[in-house]
Amino acid sequence: ALLALLSQLSEDPVTLLSATADRAAARPGDVVRVSLTVAVAEHFHLYATTSKITPVAVKIQTPDVQLDGKLEEPEPKIVDFFGEKYPAHEGEVTLVARCRIGRVPDGPLEIRGTLVGQACDDKVCKNVEVAFSVTVAIGEAAPKAALAAVSVEKNEITVRLRLEPEAARVVPGSASVALDAPHVAAGMRELPDGAAFTVAGAPERVKGRLKLKVTDGKRTADVEIAFEAVLPVEHLDSLDAGLARAKREGKPVFLEFTGES
């Protein structure tokens, strides 16, 4: 029994399966999400971030890189340990550390850290120290954009983008939009993360392409984003009502006849 206990004490109850960053490149001021997938040994549990007993945490060793907020974790289980209940993780679990990049030079940056905490079974408790590292490129990638959301308010379409790095913004005066016929864009309003514009044309599905420039203050990139939106259709009681509304608002009239004339 003593030999079995000594063998158990010499084994690591938590092992690192993978460490990955959510981006390949970043800028000073950006937040890099580092996902740590670990395996907790059978019969052991790793105490969660909210546990009163040695909660799991991350320590960063890389200079000018700091944790941004608490460690993210899935919903923990509630385990019974000597009559007390604690939140903990068992089996395979992925924890996410938000790492904010400070003033670091351009080039490869190795983010090094250690996952710390405590893991227990019904016989022993062991301190956890699991080293990890990921590498991101600093200052080497041009800013980029992807479609984040398209919203519609009456006949105004707003296209918002997800920009990287976080400091990136739309270059003022650079945005233009081209809509598929028969629609025409008007009243362009540039936003820090996209653009808004009104649409003249039949109320129906609208497709188009938003072109603009994105800058992070150092580099500028040309971006073209395809989007699609559905304008709301307003049904009026009569042709006279529709013509009167169009005359008041100065809008073109589109007539669609159905059935027999």
Image (tube, rainbow, N blue to C red):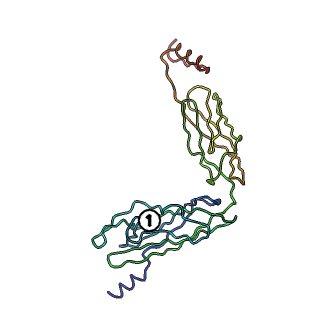
Residue at the image position 55 percent from the left and 29 percent from the top: 204
Residue 9 screen position, x and y as percent: 40, 82
- The one of 48 and 69 positioned closer to us in this rendering: 69
Q: On the image, numbered disc 1 is attached to which residue?
A: 93
Nearest to the observer: residue 14 or residue 191 = 191
Where's residue 4, x and y in %? 35, 85
At 64% across and 32% down in the image, what residue appears? 180
Q: Residues within 10 Å of mark 1 (few under 14, many from 20)?
A: some
Q: Please name the residue shown 66% across and 65% down the image.
A: 104
Name the image quarter holding residue 138: bottom right
The vertical placement of 207 against 40, above or below, is above
Farthest residue to the top: give it: 261
Residue at coordinates 42% horizontally, 75% vertically from top-left?
13
Q: Quadrant of residue 87?
A: bottom left
Q: Given the current orientation, which residue lies at the most extreme left position?
A: 83
Q: Is residue 224 above or below residue 79?
A: above
In this rendering, the answer to whether 55 lies above or below 205 is below
Give left or right: position of 51 versus 24.
Answer: left
Q: Quadrant of the N terminus?
A: bottom left
Q: Quadrant of residue 244?
A: top right
Mark 1 falls on what kind of element? Answer: strand
169 or 234, nearer to the observer: 169
Give the percent coordinates (x, y) of residue 161.
60, 45
